[in-house]
Amino acid sequence: MLVVDTYAIPAACGAEESTIRQIFHPHTYKLETRYSIAHCTLGPGKSTKPHMLKSSEVYYIIKGSGTIYVDKESADVGPGKSVYVPPNSRQSIKNTSDVQLEFLCIVDPAWRKEDERFD
């Protein structure tokens, strides 16, 4: 068993004032898993840059509300909502609330920098 304190993980800062904490990744703890899980936050009114991943991704919203964009579709999301993003889909998320948008990103196969493209 492995227990991790998510908030003790140093946060990487994104250009859009987001934070990303890689909770579980096969390379971080030498885990025998294909997927990675990251905890992310995004400030009020902020959006992530549109990007594409070679992997599939699932967003799970913990706190706040926003709008997620996948290719030509969009959906409003809030706590308890999950969104599946197919591989190679153009995606971004916008915080439409006045509090931090907090969510998990589950990527399978695990996230790799070389698998991500920005517009």
Image (spheres, grey):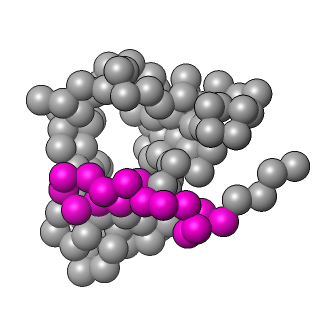
118 vs 73, nearest the viewer: 118
Coordinates of residue 115 in the picture (x, y in percent)? 36, 21
Q: Position of residue 43 (x, y in %)?
A: 25, 70
Q: Residue at x 18, y 30 (%)?
A: 118
Let me know if residue 103 appears in the view: no
Instruction: Specify the segment rendered in magenta.
Output: 5-20
Q: Residue furthest bottom?
A: 98
Q: Residue furthest right?
A: 1
Residue drawn at the location 31% of the way across and 26% of the way down: 116
User: On the picture, is 45 further left or further right than 37?
Assistant: left
State the image coordinates of residue 68 (x, y, percent, origin top left): 28, 49
Instruction: Report the front residue among 15 and 54.
Output: 15
Nearer to us in this view, 33 or 91: 33
Q: Is residue 67 magenta?
A: no
In the displayed structure, 114 sits above or below 47; it is above
Residue extending farthest left:
119
Q: Is residue 36 left or right of residue 46?
A: right
Q: Quadrant of the C terminus?
A: top left
Query: Which residue is located at x 72 percent, y 32 percent?
Result: 30
Residue name at image x 58 percent, y 68 percent: 8
Q: In this view of the protein, can residue 7 be seen by the observer?
A: yes
Residue 32, quarter of the rendered image: top right
Task: Report which quarter residue 90 is drawn in.
Answer: top left
Specify the quadrant of the image occupied by residue 25. Answer: top right
Q: Is residue 13 left or right of residue 103?
A: left
User: Is residue 114 shown above or below 10?
Assistant: above
Give the mark count: 0
